[in-house]
Amino acid sequence: MTIPYSAGTSFATPTCVGGVIKYPFANEGDSATKVYVHDMQVARANYAPLAFNNFMETGGGANQQKPVRSPFADDANAFWVGDSEPTDNGTSIVSFQRTFANVPAPRLEGNGIYAFTYPGISATTEQVFGTSKSSPTPLASYESATDSGVLVFEVTNPGDYAIGQKFDVRNNSQPFPYRFEKRIVFNGSWILDVYQNGFVTDISGDQITIKSVLGSNYNGLRFPNSTASTVTMVQSLPSRNPFTQNANSRKTISYLKSDDLIGIPIGSQFSVVASDGTPTDTLTATTTPNKDQYLDIVTAGEFINAESTKISRWMGNIWESVNITVEAL
């Protein structure tokens, strides 16, 4: 895309003699963001930089500053972001590169494992997610290949469920959670085990399947002699102390063109604030967020800010904003 040198110009005006388009984020799936690099020449005495609000379009407007003889089509969304240091050619002419760039689109990237300290919870909090419209049929079954207890039943709102959701399942005919009785290998006696930490593994029409891994140290399974009933799916977080855990994290990167760095919004690291406004490491009924609100965050599969937003200059007055988030647990 090089334009040959023209002996017919005195280069009194900055003139393009070649150029290239770069795609800085093509490997990240963004092939729309372009950086236009112009190889320029001008008489030494006539060199001057442009302004950050100038853009790459032909016309007589003050901000329409597309280089003379640019090989590229007009792009009013490409802004001047800088010139390289002019280099003396040994004559009265200097050479430099003049660059215009689009404001990149936001993107989401994986960020690997991140060690994050999660808040404690003062007391168990729970919420009812939904109730089945049928009894599990059969009441329950055992899947030997995965050492799992399995419940299959119909719900009225299958669109609200998602593969991987975790529930405690309550048998509505009894005052306690649905349970399995399991026989321990080493002594053959039967013990009760609450059906907890069941995960949705299949959704077919209005029928869902929930499995709970029981463990390989059991060689039998039976069910309590109780009336089959509808079941209620309950989501809960038990009381706990603050803890640090390696968690899935991701990075949200966005861009903003602005002459006002101070005015660029910055997200804060996730924190818990007590009712008196002081920081605390434990969620209660009166903190912000409170323990019920945090349960909503967890059950929705949301991510929370692991750090405050980091702002840095990308090019010119285009700023890069990076937010690292971790899975709420």
Image (spheres, rainbow, N blue to C red):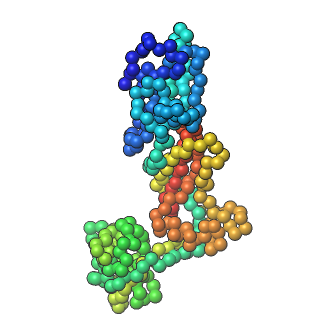
Q: Quadrant of the N terminus?
A: top left
Residue at image position (57%, 29%) is 50
Left or right? Give the position of 119 relative to 161: right
Q: Is the residue 154 above or below the residue 239 in the image?
A: below
In terms of image quadrants, where is residue 152?
bottom left
* Residue 33: quadrant of the picture: top left
Q: Please, is residue 272 above or below residue 228 in the view?
A: above
Q: Nearer the viewer, residue 257 or 146?
A: 257
Q: In this image, 68 relative to 199: left or right?
A: right
Residue under the image location 52 percent in, 70 percent down: 295
User: Where does the image place residue 36, in percent across and percent down from the top left?
Assistant: 45, 31
**Side of 64 where 266 appears, left or right:** right
Tell me residue 103's x, y (percent).
49, 42
Q: Is residue 213 visible?
A: no
Q: Extreme right residue here?
A: 276
Q: Position of residue 72 (x, y in %)?
A: 41, 31
Q: Taking 271 as reference, is 27 above or below it?
A: above
Image point (62%, 74%), residue name: 285
